Amino acid sequence: MKSNKGILIPIGGNEDKGIEADEMYTLDFVTEGILYRIVELSGGIDAKIVVIPTASSIPVEIGDNYLEAFGTIGCTNVEILDIRSQKDSESSRAIDLISKANCVMFSGGNQSKITEHIGGSSIHKILKERYKNESDFVIAGTSAGAMAMANNMIAGGSAVDSFVKGAVKMKKGLSLVPQLTIDTHFIKRGRFGRLAEAVARYPERIGIGLAEDTGLVIQKNECEVIGSGMVIVFDPRKLKHNNSSILSEGTPMSLTNLKTHVLANGDRFNIKKKTVKVLPVTEPFV
């Protein structure tokens, strides 16, 4: 199967928007931040960027935040596409914006809203077609927007109760990157067990746990870590024990030989080859 030509950027949530004064942000927003990288890959500050706050319970406020954040970088061509139903996804404005955008960005919130209101629609089909065929087309998503990119999408599940069978809710996502199962806010919300159960249920998928203000730039199966945090990779291809299929719901699970990588800014992972390339240990600390 041929790899998609476009660029996919899933983000772990709470990405630096250039308006916070928080110690967690250790990269310069304007030159090294995730949103700056999105703008750069989309063609620069004149790029047509469409923000879709469908997942959010406060879409207007979220849209305003992104207008301010992209404006801080210097972008002048940013549109908010507030989709709240399948009917909205079929509107002529939505189809026109998605057809002409250099970048489409999904906000955080509830990922099920994205799949319910956009999944299977005309703009979903346009997104998939453009991502498949256009090398300069970018789809980004933060938190819920990142999780919805998968085929087997994590739809919910408490980190406290995770790693008992059935604790994690799974739904069909947008299938932009079906080889991965993505979880977000991974470190701060302690979602190790949640992603481990998802991998146990779908061992043909690689598990990706994204910390906040951290993302991946995915181009032709090559993933580059961006942002200030870490990415956890669960590679289940050589599992020796996985009792997920025989257990009753509510029963604690066990896995053995789950290969795990902890990656940081600049490190790379190849989805197809399942190989890792990290920066040399001799690299100076910044």
Image (cartoon, rainbow, N blue to C red):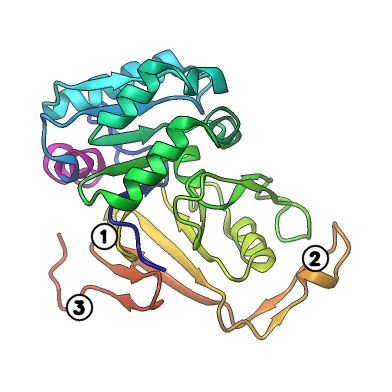
How far from the left and from the top, in percent, is residue 248? 89, 63
How far from the left and from the top, in percent, is residue 240? 66, 86
With respect to residue 99, does 182 lie above or below?
A: below
How far from the left and from the top, in percent, is residue 50? 30, 27
Compute the Cα span from label 2 to label 1.
34 Å
Compute the Cα span from label 1 to label 3.
12 Å
Q: The disc labelled 3 sits on which kind of residue?
A: Pro
Residue located at (34% from left, 70% from top): 269
Question: Which disc is residue 265 wearing?
Answer: 1
Is residue 44 visible to us here?
A: yes
The single residue placed furthest to the right in the displayed view is: 248
The residue pinned by badge 3 equals 280
The single residue placed furthest to the top in the displayed view is: 60
Q: Tag 3's secondary structure?
A: loop
How far from the left and from the top, in percent, is residue 73? 14, 30
**Residue 36 lies in magenta, yes or no?**
yes
| C-beta proximity under 8 Å, tags 1 and 3 | no
Residue located at (67% from left, 62% from top): 197
Quadrant of the frame with the N terminus: bottom left
Segment colored magenta: 24-40
Q: The disc labelled 2 sits on which kind of residue?
A: Pro
**Side of 241 where 225 appears, left or right:** left
Q: The disc labelled 1 sits on which kind of residue?
A: Asn
Is residue 185 visible to us here?
A: no
The residue pinned by badge 2 equals 252
**Side of 286 where 199 appears, left or right:** right
